Image (tube, coloured by chain):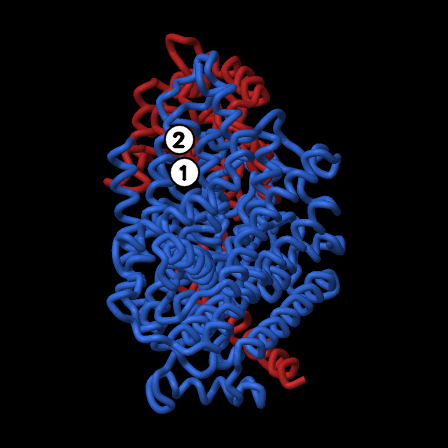
Chain colours: A red, B blue
Amino acid sequence: MDSLLGSLRLVVVTMLICVAGYATVIWGIGQILTSSTAQGSLIMAPDGKIVGSRLIAQNFTEAKYFWPRPSAVDYNAAAAGGSNKSPTSTDLTKRAEEIVSRYGAKAANPLPPELAAASGAGLDPHISVNAAMYQAKRVAEARGLPLSQVETIIRESEFAPGGFLTPDRLVNVLELNLALDRLAAAQ
Amino acid sequence: MVTYAILFVIIIVGTTIALSWPLGNYMKWAMDPESAEGGAARFTRAFRWIGGRVTRVQQDWKRYIVAMLIFNLVMFIVSYAIMALQQYLPLNPDARGAISADLIFNTASSFTSNTNLQHYSGEVSMSYLSQLAALMWLQFVSAATGIAALAAIARGLAGRKDLGNFFVDVQRATFLVLLPLALVVAILMVLGGLPMTLQGAAHAMTLEGAEQIIARGPVAAFVAIKQLGTNGGGFFGPNSTHPFENPTFWTNALEMISIILIPMACVWMFGRIVGRTRHAAVVFAVMLALVLIRMAFAVGFATAPTEAFDQLPIAQNAGNLEGKELRFGATSGPTWAVLTTSTSNGSVGAMHDSLNPLVGLMPMIGMWLNEDLGGVGVGMINMFLYIVVAVFIAGMMIGRTPEYLGWRVESREVKFAIVALLAHGLFILGGTAIFAVTPWGTDTLNNVGPHGFSEMLYEFSSASANNGSGFEGLGDNTVPWNVSTGIVMLLARFIPIILPLAIVGSLMAKRRTAESAGTLGVEDGTFAGMLLVTIVIVGALTFFPAATLGPVAEHFMYMVK
């Protein structure tokens, strides 16, 4: 009986300190120091409407935009997930065949691998610089821009995710596309 | 790529080892105050005041177990009630509805047992109140239960008269160990870009004019204790592959360090309480060797590209990227898979179902050995079981009385240890066998052939090892999966805590002998070798046939050309 009473007293105190107190402190720090990322790194249009999140991939299919990695959940940010297919699965082959034909990839000009592989949450916001360069010609033609100008925009937005600890250079697809749209609006 | 992999592993594991030593000393100070006055004993008075009359008695092993079970039962009931009533309770901005009873049972079992196997998807099913007050709360107190149990076992082996008081120990672990660390890590997480908001999902209009609903929530606080307490249950379905749970390379590195930090420190705490730091160092070295061997294999096998793209015009120069995030770098996926199963954490930084077949075998081996480093507290307890068996076998081999830290190990203790170790194999292989021959299992697979078998094998391994990761393609939110893994998780949690406490109780009833020249040493390479061999033989051989039916078969069918 004492044990039960002791357990209940511990429940009350741990709930107050480790749930209410702890969460409030972290919430407060987030709201004060990093309020933008604490709300989900949302990107607003000039009219105040939410365009998306800097951290969350959204779908792009039009030729004038860079396309993200495929998503097993169709970029559903309310029910994220991966394909969970074995890398030996023929389902992945079928999905990749479709992507290869959409990009028009040939053996002489093979598709960068992440453009055929879905990420764990289906929301990876990045592609490699290689994968962006691979699409630069299509984007430049659709927008009537010189290829060099599109390549410059890619170079300007590339970053190394882990500094000297990673050889990779990535770009954020949504931010890249926003930069293109800003350029179009300015012209 | 190999250079970057080695550099990355050295930084993550090396940093954590360096941090684990001072943390282990601190945990000894916090969990086991030496005198009744001053130091951490000041807090003891507060904990007695909070816990009431039950905290004023010293408990023997039986009373300690009863206290632990009652508290854990209350944990289960409270969390069950919150989840069952979430549709009527506040902090539910996205109007999450009722959850089925079998799924609540599975989830409450899962988080009470420190497993965090998830048959639900957080952003789809759970209100913010369920996430915080049911699940995150259990992530604190279930982890604290494990640390408390280890402190009690260490006190018994140190020759104390009694094991302490569970209700005081669990508060020490919660308030003095887990809470300060969680605050530090959560602040770094929120600065690193994780969301921490109570607002509901954001509704976005994409550049191409489609609607995108972006689920979010109080993620940073949740993720910190999820990693530190070897819980592993994600705020979102895809766990730490989700950009909101793990937005950058640096949060990824911090989460990996958090996964192994307290399990490592627990070994040092154990060594300090029993007064044998050198012995702890030997045990630590054995654990570390097992982790690094598996990691080397995992990183090596992960360099093979996606087999399914073999005949297509796709560059195959980056390994297998299915289920992986670009921002973490190429070697994070397999490295994380090994670390998360070297402890009972079970969070994922890549989809394990989509790892190359033999990479996917490495986390399974980790869970079969019941995790090299183990869960907070329970990892070292599990190692204690292997130690009991190892000293017994060694003693029999050379014809000396088996002893551990001056305690005579006899048939009763070894029987308890063997039962606890074999229960693990029974749950995994028995469960997989039943589901592999019935629609309970075969109707829920996401992949065909040996990989489908691997999905079932992984699920029971994860439940019995209290790990919580999964081959998540498995459609596991069914009544048979929810009930069976729910029961396995509870049994596999409490049997390996109760039996070691019983062993310690049985040892304490004997007279401790002074160590002499004839005593088997537990601080040298011979002991390390003996322990390693025992772990590999008892742990791995049991599961070898099952491994050949799953990942090994898949490797030879597809990966060998």
Residue at 32 percent across and 47 percent down: it is: B289
- Pointer 2 and pointer 1: residues touching (CB < 8 Å)? yes
Provide the residue designation for mark 2. B302
Q: Residues within 10 Å of mark 1 (few under 14, many from 20)?
A: many
Disc 1 residue type? Pro
Callout 2: helix, strand or loop?
A: loop
Q: Which residue appears farthest toward the front when viewing the image?
A: B399
Q: Nearer the viewer, residue B137 or B430?
A: B430
Q: Which mark is residue B334?
A: 1
Residue at 34 percent across and 41 percent down: it is: B293
**In the rendered image, which quarter is residue A32 located in?**
bottom left
Image coords of residue B497 (percent x, y)? 53, 64
Placement of the C terminus of chain B among the 4 image quadrants: top left
Disc 2 residue type? Ala
How many numbered marks have been drawn onto this rendered protein structure? 2
Q: Residues within 10 Å of mark 2 (few under 14, many from 20)?
A: many
B240 to B179, vertically: above or below? above
Residue at 41 percent across and 9 percent down: it is: A107
| Left or right: residue A153 compared with residue B128 | left
Image coords of residue B223 (percent x, y)? 48, 56
| Left or right: residue B143 compared with residue B42 | right
